Image: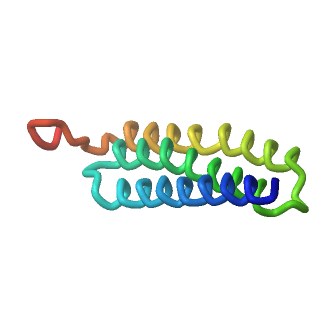
Amino acid sequence: MMYLNDIAGGFFLVTGCLLMLVAGVGVVKLPDVYCRAHALGKAMTLGIIFLLFAMGFLIEEIPWSKIVAVIGFQLVTIPVASHLLCLAAYRRKVRRWSGEGWV
């Protein structure tokens, strides 16, 4: 049973790190604030959730109720913050990128 926890924890740890890497690359490479916020809102949320699952499997002292509470908090706050960032950029009339160029 211990090996199963280590395998699951390792899988979630590697997957979470890869998703966080994708979010970082998205912030650096994407052209405008709207695309960057989308990359952060999706990949960062999933990356943090996977890392929290890995923590639950690998550290036995942490109760799963705390991990579920933190995951719920992340699911509520990160997408809302991403949306508010885009709303602030939209209200300030920040230009956005389209297929033809900057709009």
Tell me where residue 56 appears, x and y as whole percent. 78, 54
- Reply above or below: 19 against 88: below
Residue at the spot x=70%, y=50% of the render? 53
* Colour mapping used in the image: rainbow
Tell me where residue 34 appears, x and y as whole percent. 36, 42
- Reply above or below: 46 against 29: above
Q: In the displayed structure, does residue 87 sit left or right of residue 4?
A: left
Q: In the displayed structure, does residue 65 sit left or right of residue 103?
A: right
- Reply above or below: 16 against 96: below
State the residue in front, 20 or 15. 15
Tell me where residue 31 appears, x and y as whole percent. 25, 51
Tell me where residue 43 appears, x and y as whole percent. 48, 47
- Reply above or below: 61 against 97: below
Please count the marks in the image: 0
Q: In the displayed structure, does residue 46 sit left or right of residue 86?
A: right
Residue at the spot x=68%, y=45% of the render? 74
Q: In the displayed structure, does residue 69 sit left or right of residue 13?
A: right
Residue at the spot x=81%, y=63% of the render? 59
State the residue in front, 75 or 90. 75
State the residue in front, 29 or 68. 68
Which residue is outermost to the left? 100
Residue at the spot x=28%, y=57% of the render? 29
The quadrant of the picture occupied by the C terminus is top left
